[in-house]
Amino acid sequence: GRSPDSTVLDAKVTVEGWTPDNFDGEYAGRVTLAQALARSLNSAAVRVGEEAGRARVIATARRLGLSSPLSPQPSLMLGAFETSLIELTAAYAAIANGGRAVHPHAIRSIEAADKPLWLAPKPSAPQVAQAEATASLARMMAGVIEGGTGRAARLDRPAAGKTGTSQESRDAWFIGWSGDIVTGVWMGNDDGAPMPGTTGGGPPARAWKRFMQ
Protein backbone atom coordinates (compact mmCIF):
# COMPACT_ATOMS: atom_id res chain seq x y z
CA GLY A 1 0.00 0.00 0.00
CA ARG A 2 2.99 2.34 0.13
CA SER A 3 4.32 4.38 -2.80
CA PRO A 4 7.83 5.68 -3.54
CA ASP A 5 6.70 9.08 -2.24
CA SER A 6 5.39 7.70 1.06
CA THR A 7 7.51 8.78 4.00
CA VAL A 8 9.24 6.89 6.79
CA LEU A 9 11.22 8.06 9.79
CA ASP A 10 14.95 7.37 9.58
CA ALA A 11 15.97 7.48 13.22
CA LYS A 12 17.39 5.07 15.77
CA VAL A 13 15.04 2.13 16.21
CA THR A 14 15.18 -0.88 18.54
CA VAL A 15 13.33 -4.12 17.80
CA GLU A 16 13.47 -6.97 20.33
CA GLY A 17 16.65 -5.56 21.82
CA TRP A 18 18.39 -5.17 18.44
CA THR A 19 19.37 -1.67 17.31
CA PRO A 20 20.68 -1.41 13.74
CA ASP A 21 22.83 1.53 12.70
CA ASN A 22 23.04 3.28 9.37
CA PHE A 23 26.34 2.75 7.56
CA ASP A 24 27.62 6.24 8.33
CA GLY A 25 26.11 6.36 11.81
CA GLU A 26 23.90 9.32 10.88
CA TYR A 27 20.14 9.60 10.50
CA ALA A 28 18.16 11.59 7.95
CA GLY A 29 14.86 12.07 9.76
CA ARG A 30 11.68 11.78 7.72
CA VAL A 31 12.42 10.70 4.14
CA THR A 32 10.52 9.20 1.25
CA LEU A 33 10.81 5.48 0.59
CA ALA A 34 12.62 6.32 -2.64
CA GLN A 35 15.20 8.36 -0.74
CA ALA A 36 15.59 5.65 1.90
CA LEU A 37 16.28 2.99 -0.72
CA ALA A 38 18.65 5.19 -2.73
CA ARG A 39 20.69 5.96 0.38
CA SER A 40 20.47 2.44 1.90
CA LEU A 41 19.08 3.73 5.19
CA ASN A 42 18.99 0.68 7.44
CA SER A 43 16.74 2.01 10.17
CA ALA A 44 14.13 3.09 7.62
CA ALA A 45 14.22 -0.36 6.01
CA VAL A 46 13.64 -2.01 9.38
CA ARG A 47 10.66 0.25 10.11
CA VAL A 48 9.04 -0.51 6.74
CA GLY A 49 9.71 -4.23 7.12
CA GLU A 50 8.20 -4.33 10.59
CA GLU A 51 5.16 -2.46 9.29
CA ALA A 52 4.71 -4.96 6.47
CA GLY A 53 5.36 -7.95 8.74
CA ARG A 54 8.24 -10.41 8.65
CA ALA A 55 6.09 -13.30 7.43
CA ARG A 56 4.98 -11.23 4.42
CA VAL A 57 8.58 -10.20 3.70
CA ILE A 58 9.63 -13.86 3.65
CA ALA A 59 6.63 -14.85 1.52
CA THR A 60 7.51 -12.19 -1.03
CA ALA A 61 11.14 -13.34 -1.11
CA ARG A 62 9.97 -16.91 -1.73
CA ARG A 63 7.71 -15.85 -4.59
CA LEU A 64 10.61 -13.96 -6.18
CA GLY A 65 12.70 -17.15 -6.07
CA LEU A 66 14.80 -17.06 -2.88
CA SER A 67 14.90 -20.62 -1.51
CA SER A 68 17.75 -20.16 0.99
CA PRO A 69 16.86 -20.43 4.70
CA LEU A 70 15.15 -17.30 6.04
CA SER A 71 14.06 -16.71 9.62
CA PRO A 72 11.54 -14.12 10.89
CA GLN A 73 14.09 -12.14 12.87
CA PRO A 74 14.30 -8.32 12.83
CA SER A 75 17.64 -8.47 10.96
CA LEU A 76 15.83 -10.18 8.07
CA MET A 77 15.06 -6.71 6.72
CA LEU A 78 18.77 -6.01 6.19
CA GLY A 79 19.58 -9.28 4.45
CA ALA A 80 21.18 -10.97 7.44
CA PHE A 81 20.70 -14.46 5.98
CA GLU A 82 22.97 -15.94 3.36
CA THR A 83 21.83 -16.65 -0.17
CA SER A 84 23.56 -17.28 -3.47
CA LEU A 85 24.32 -14.65 -6.06
CA ILE A 86 22.32 -16.50 -8.72
CA GLU A 87 19.22 -16.63 -6.51
CA LEU A 88 19.45 -12.96 -5.67
CA THR A 89 20.07 -11.96 -9.28
CA ALA A 90 17.08 -14.03 -10.40
CA ALA A 91 14.91 -12.24 -7.83
CA TYR A 92 16.02 -8.88 -9.25
CA ALA A 93 15.27 -10.24 -12.72
CA ALA A 94 11.68 -10.88 -11.64
CA ILE A 95 11.40 -7.21 -10.66
CA ALA A 96 12.87 -6.15 -14.01
CA ASN A 97 10.46 -8.59 -15.68
CA GLY A 98 7.36 -6.80 -14.44
CA GLY A 99 6.80 -9.18 -11.54
CA ARG A 100 7.04 -12.39 -13.55
CA ALA A 101 9.27 -15.12 -12.16
CA VAL A 102 12.63 -15.85 -13.77
CA HIS A 103 14.19 -19.30 -13.44
CA PRO A 104 17.94 -19.23 -14.16
CA HIS A 105 19.69 -22.20 -15.76
CA ALA A 106 23.26 -22.82 -16.86
CA ILE A 107 22.74 -25.13 -19.86
CA ARG A 108 20.47 -24.22 -22.77
CA SER A 109 21.02 -27.36 -24.83
CA ILE A 110 23.21 -30.38 -25.52
CA GLU A 111 23.72 -31.01 -29.22
CA ALA A 112 25.27 -33.64 -31.44
CA ALA A 113 26.66 -32.77 -34.84
CA ASP A 114 23.33 -33.42 -36.56
CA LYS A 115 20.63 -32.91 -33.92
CA PRO A 116 19.93 -31.63 -30.43
CA LEU A 117 20.12 -34.32 -27.76
CA TRP A 118 18.52 -32.24 -25.01
CA LEU A 119 16.88 -28.85 -24.74
CA ALA A 120 16.24 -27.02 -21.52
CA PRO A 121 12.50 -26.92 -20.89
CA LYS A 122 11.00 -23.50 -21.38
CA PRO A 123 10.24 -22.31 -17.87
CA SER A 124 6.91 -20.84 -16.97
CA ALA A 125 6.88 -17.19 -15.93
CA PRO A 126 4.02 -16.85 -13.45
CA GLN A 127 3.11 -13.44 -12.09
CA VAL A 128 4.61 -13.48 -8.59
CA ALA A 129 4.36 -9.77 -7.76
CA GLN A 130 2.08 -6.97 -8.88
CA ALA A 131 3.32 -5.30 -12.05
CA GLU A 132 2.44 -1.86 -10.66
CA ALA A 133 4.42 -2.51 -7.49
CA THR A 134 7.49 -3.81 -9.31
CA ALA A 135 7.36 -0.84 -11.69
CA SER A 136 7.44 1.51 -8.69
CA LEU A 137 10.32 -0.44 -7.18
CA ALA A 138 12.19 -0.34 -10.50
CA ARG A 139 11.87 3.45 -10.56
CA MET A 140 13.21 3.61 -7.00
CA MET A 141 16.15 1.40 -7.97
CA ALA A 142 16.90 3.69 -10.89
CA GLY A 143 17.29 6.40 -8.28
CA VAL A 144 19.95 4.31 -6.52
CA ILE A 145 22.14 4.66 -9.62
CA GLU A 146 21.15 8.22 -10.50
CA GLY A 147 21.91 9.77 -7.14
CA GLY A 148 22.25 7.15 -4.43
CA THR A 149 24.77 4.58 -3.23
CA GLY A 150 25.09 3.12 -6.75
CA ARG A 151 26.32 6.24 -8.55
CA ALA A 152 29.51 4.45 -9.60
CA ALA A 153 27.36 2.13 -11.75
CA ARG A 154 25.77 4.94 -13.77
CA LEU A 155 25.55 4.22 -17.51
CA ASP A 156 24.78 6.41 -20.51
CA ARG A 157 21.37 4.75 -20.75
CA PRO A 158 18.56 3.90 -18.28
CA ALA A 159 19.55 1.39 -15.59
CA ALA A 160 18.37 0.30 -12.16
CA GLY A 161 20.02 -1.61 -9.34
CA LYS A 162 20.98 -1.83 -5.69
CA THR A 163 24.13 -1.95 -3.62
CA GLY A 164 24.66 -4.28 -0.69
CA THR A 165 27.31 -4.49 2.02
CA SER A 166 27.26 -7.02 4.84
CA GLN A 167 28.55 -6.51 8.37
CA GLU A 168 32.26 -5.63 8.56
CA SER A 169 32.28 -5.55 4.74
CA ARG A 170 32.56 -9.34 4.48
CA ASP A 171 30.38 -9.21 1.38
CA ALA A 172 29.87 -6.45 -1.15
CA TRP A 173 27.57 -6.70 -4.14
CA PHE A 174 25.80 -4.77 -6.83
CA ILE A 175 22.88 -6.19 -8.80
CA GLY A 176 21.01 -4.36 -11.50
CA TRP A 177 19.75 -4.29 -15.04
CA SER A 178 19.66 -2.24 -18.20
CA GLY A 179 17.50 -3.22 -21.14
CA ASP A 180 17.03 -6.99 -21.07
CA ILE A 181 20.27 -7.87 -19.24
CA VAL A 182 20.31 -8.43 -15.47
CA THR A 183 23.75 -8.78 -13.89
CA GLY A 184 24.92 -9.52 -10.37
CA VAL A 185 28.43 -8.84 -9.02
CA TRP A 186 29.59 -10.15 -5.64
CA MET A 187 32.97 -9.60 -4.02
CA GLY A 188 34.29 -11.24 -0.89
CA ASN A 189 37.02 -13.46 0.55
CA ASP A 190 36.83 -17.25 0.45
CA ASP A 191 37.35 -17.40 4.21
CA GLY A 192 34.81 -14.68 4.95
CA ALA A 193 37.46 -12.23 6.13
CA PRO A 194 36.44 -8.55 6.25
CA MET A 195 37.32 -6.17 3.43
CA PRO A 196 37.81 -2.86 5.28
CA GLY A 197 36.41 0.11 3.41
CA THR A 198 34.81 -1.97 0.65
CA THR A 199 31.13 -1.36 -0.09
CA GLY A 200 28.72 -2.49 -2.79
CA GLY A 201 28.82 1.01 -4.22
CA GLY A 202 32.58 0.74 -4.76
CA PRO A 203 34.37 -2.08 -6.65
CA PRO A 204 31.23 -4.19 -7.34
CA ALA A 205 29.37 -1.21 -8.84
CA ARG A 206 32.36 -0.25 -10.97
CA ALA A 207 32.80 -3.85 -12.18
CA TRP A 208 29.08 -4.02 -13.00
CA LYS A 209 29.38 -0.82 -15.03
CA ARG A 210 32.36 -2.08 -17.01
CA PHE A 211 30.59 -5.34 -17.83
CA MET A 212 27.36 -3.62 -18.83
CA GLN A 213 29.23 -1.14 -21.05
Image (tube, rainbow, N blue to C red):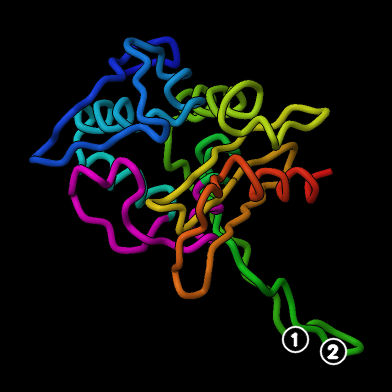
x and y percentages locating residue 155 in the rendered image: 78, 32
Let me know if residue 34 is in the magenta part. Answer: no
Depicted 25 relative to depicted 103: above or below:
above
Indicate left or right for 62 with 109 as reference. Answer: left
Residue shown at 19% from the left, 35% from the top = 53
Amino acid identity at mark 2: Ala
Crowding at label 1, few (<14), some or many (≥20) Cα neighbours within 10 Å?
few
Residue at the disc numbered 2: 112
**Pointer 1: what residue?**
117
Q: Quadrant of residue 14?
A: top left
Looking at the rendered structure, the kind of residue marked 1 is: Leu
Count of residue discs: 2
Quarter of the picture holding the C terminus: top right
The structure residue drawn at horizontal position 9% and vertical position 40%, both measured from the top left corner, is: 17
Q: Is residue 74 above or below residue 191?
A: above
Quadrant assignment, res 133: top left
Q: Position of residue 115 (x, y in %)?
A: 85, 84
Question: Residue at the location (26% across, 20% down)?
Answer: 11
* The N terminus lies in quadrant: top left
The boundaries of the magenta stretch are 66-91
Say whether marks 1 and 2 touch (CB < 8 Å).
yes
Q: Nearer the viewer, residue 113 or 149?
A: 149
